[in-house]
Amino acid sequence: MYLFGFGSLINLSSAQKSFKRVLSQKDLLPVKIKGYERIWNAVESIQFEGEDKAINGVFLNIKKSENSTLYGVMIEISDEELEILKLREKNYSCITIKKEDVLNLDVKADLIAFMTTKEDKLAKTGDKNSFIPEKYTQIVKDALKNYDEDFNKDFEKIFENYPFILKNGNYSFTDSIQNKAAREGTKS
């Protein structure tokens, strides 16, 4: 099966943290899909180093958008890897992207993607105690050097006019199982 990654999973180093096998850049195949757009609205409970209180970290998400296209990566995954990724992406729902919606590759099967759909896990402009971790934006930006100009252009707009304040510093997920899946790729 194949996973569609559209945020930190486009970064080889970040993706590697949730896999027991060694990935290479060749495992992250650039794909363009239709019918979705990238948006800053997925909420995860995080805590920054040196701070006592958890905050709402706002991360990238996708939403249906009939006339939009979106670049990301396609990664072949096993059932076991999917289960680890579900822990990493615990507030996201698994959705199916039809193989017909992949525009630049001839794929033989539908793709799985993680999309936040639960209302209580969707950030809204003006929400208090909600920040975009600057370190997360850097993970995505660092990955872009591995992709072509069209792929990079598709990401430009998410780094302009952020809908939430950027917060600098190291952070971790407050859910220890999620944090472990995002850092080590193993279950506790």
Image: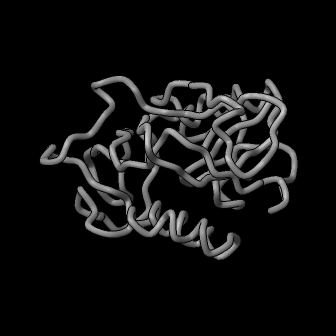
Horizontal side of residue 160 vs 130, given as left or right = right
Query: Residue at position x 65%, y 76% from top?
Result: 145
Q: Nearer the viewer, residue 134 or 62?
A: 62
Q: Position of residue 125 (x, y in %)?
A: 17, 47
Instruction: Tell me where residue 178 sits by quadrant.
Output: top right
Instruction: Tell me where residue 41 sits by quadrant.
Output: top left
Q: Nearer the viewer, residue 142 or 54?
A: 142
**On screen, 181 above or below 125?**
above
Q: Position of residue 70 (x, y in %)?
A: 54, 51
Horizontal side of residue 134 vs 92, given as left or right = left
Q: Nearer the viewer, residue 152 or 26?
A: 152
**On screen, 92 above or below 137?**
above
- In the picture, which quadrant includes the C terminus? top right
Query: Residue at position x 60%, y 69% from top?
Result: 150
**On screen, 13 above or below 19?**
below
The residue most toward the front is 67
Horizontal side of residue 64 vs 131, given as left or right = right
Query: Residue at position x 45%, y 29% from top?
Result: 91
Q: Position of residue 62 (x, y in %)?
A: 45, 41
